[in-house]
Image (spheres, helix red, strand yellow):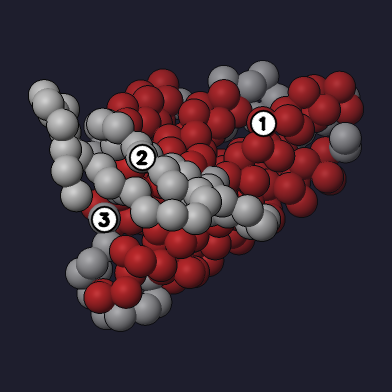
Amino acid sequence: MSGAETIGLISGLIAIIDTTVKIYSAASDASGLPEAFRDASARLPLVRETLQTALQNLEMSDADDSLYQATKPVLDGCKQKAECLEEVFRKVVPFASASRMVRYLHAVRTLGKGSLVESLMQGILRDIQLLAHSRLLKLATDEQLEELAQAEDEVSAIPPSLPLQCLSSISNSGPGIQNVNTGGGTQNNNNSSGQQFVGGTFNGPLNF
């Protein structure tokens, strides 16, 4: 991986972050959105600023390709999270407040549990801190590093944007019978013909 490729990757990452911030800023209100959306939107400018500093340093760097190659996995991972975050914002934020949670739940079920806004934002901040410590990028002062670490801690303290039980879904995509008991207690199934009587524990005969 060359310096030019690294610059292109970081520039693309900045563009994704800018788009995500604009999606949130364009919303007339944030009603119906979990706190994580507002918090992520507030943290993204810090990520963008840090990456822009990295970009400036890279443009003046004469490092060899091995150093660029060492940053690629982190940059790729950060870009993947940023793209997922943008997709969630795009699918949820522009719509009426009453439908936002339904749309968010659908988006997370489609993209996976790792696509919760707070999980994505924490992962992005963690990646940026790894990049900030890179010998190649030299993108942060001690003060900036402390700000990034504090931002990650604050994001990790955000209440879950979706209850865990909302993320489990049950489906039967093929033919046949599916008997599912998602709670406690006994499950009684009659998968053939005939009647079924379900009752408690009885002492003595039962007459029908």
| CB-based contact (under 8 Å), mark 3 and mark 2 | no
Could you tell me if the residues under marks 3 and 1 are in contact, i.e. CB atoms within 8 Å? no
Q: Residues within 10 Å of mark 1 (few under 14, many from 20)?
A: some
Residue type pointed to by label 3: Pro
Q: Quadrant of residue 31?
A: bottom left
Q: Nearer the viewer, residue 43 or 113?
A: 113
CA–CA distance between discs 3 and 2? 39 Å
Residue at the spot of label 1: 74
Question: Which-is-in-front pick, marks 3 and 1?
Answer: 3
Q: Examine the rendered structure and indicate whether residue 39 appears above or below residue 22.
A: above
Q: Which residue is mark 2?
A: 188
The disc, 3 or 2, on the residue closer to the chain's N-terminal end is 3
Classify residue 57 by image quadrant.
top right
Q: Is residue 144 above or below residue 170?
A: above
State the SS at label 1.
helix
| Quadrant the N terminus occupies | top right
- Which residue lies at the image location 19% right of the left edge and 49% below the top edge? 208
What's the amino acid at mark 1? Val
Sequence order check, earlier mark of 3 and 1 = 3
Which is more foreground, mark 2 or mark 1? 2
Q: Using a 10 Å C-alpha cutoff, classify the residue at mark 2 as few (fewer than 14 neighbours), some (14 to 19) or many (20 or more).
A: few
Q: What residue is shown at x 36% (from left), y 40% (from top)?
A: 188
Look at the numbered discs 2 and 1 and tell me whether their residues touch, using CB distance below 8 Å: no
Discs 3/2, front: 2
Q: In whole angstroms, how far apart are the C-alphas of marks 2 and 1? A: 51 Å
Q: Position of residue 92 (x, y in %)?
A: 41, 68
Residue type for callout 2: Asn
Q: Which residue is mark 3?
A: 34
147 sits left or right of 207 in the view: right
